[in-house]
Image (cartoon, rainbow, N blue to C red):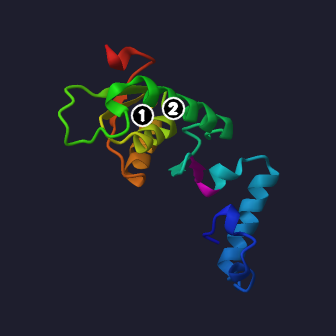
Amino acid sequence: LGVKMNQMNSPDLRSTFVTKAQYAEYCRALAEVQKGRPIDYIVSSVDFYDCTFTVNESVLIPRPETELMLDMAIKQVKQQHPLLQPGVTADEPVGAKFVAWDVCCGSGCLGIALKRALPLNTEVVLADICSDALKVAQANSVRNAVDVELRCGDLFAPFE
């Protein structure tokens, strides 16, 4: 129906009529759920850390507890990295950037959300061995309007 899960109980939605095509799509999706396919793969989308990501079988679905890990990492980086302290702007000459590697990035959710949370003085490099996963990550960087670098290779090999 083109609505997010938190909009399903909306009074506006309750008065919306469903077309035959929408009903057929709903039935198809319901059949896939009954077979055990994750809803996020069915709708090809997942919300993660105030971003929306495309997902498919080439990448893992980000888990909610991963948001907690990312939140802790962002807080730690802000406390320890001088370039990311409050009051530092992109106009100030800082001489160096904070660089983050998202190894085995999959959808790119960690690196992309990090870049959105720390847009100034942060460089994010996403790497994965799977070219299909890198295509998803590239699409997600565009979808979330962040500039990241993508590299193909196994584990740390892209960073040598």
Q: Amino acid at mark 1?
A: Ser
Work out whether mark 2 precedes mark 1 in sequence or the reverse, and give the earlier one.
2
In the image: residue 90, left or right of residue 74: left
In the image: residue 16, left or right of residue 54: right
In the image: residue 84, left or right of residue 77: left
The residue that appears at 51% across and 32% down in the rendered structure is 75
Count of numbered circles on the image: 2
Q: Position of residue 158 (x, y in %)?
A: 35, 20
In the image: residue 132, left or right of residue 50: left
Q: Nearer the viewer, mark 2 or mark 1?
A: 2
Q: Secondary structure at mark 2?
A: helix
Task: State the residue in front, 62 or 55.
Answer: 62
Does any portion of residue 129 appear in the rendered image?
A: no
Look at the image and say whether residue 22 sits in the magenta stretch: no
Q: Amino acid at mark 2?
A: Lys
Check residue 158 in the rendering and tell me which mark sits there, or answer none: none
Residue ID for mark 2: 75
| Relative height, residue 116 to residue 4 (above, below) | above
Residue ID for mark 1: 131
> Callout 1: 10 Å neighbours few (<14), some, many (20+)?
some
> Callout 2: 10 Å neighbours few (<14), some, many (20+)?
few
Residue 59 occupies which quadrant of the picture?
top right
Q: Which residues are magenta?
A: 43-48
Task: State the residue in front, 130 or 40.
Answer: 40
| Image quarter in which the N terminus is found | bottom right
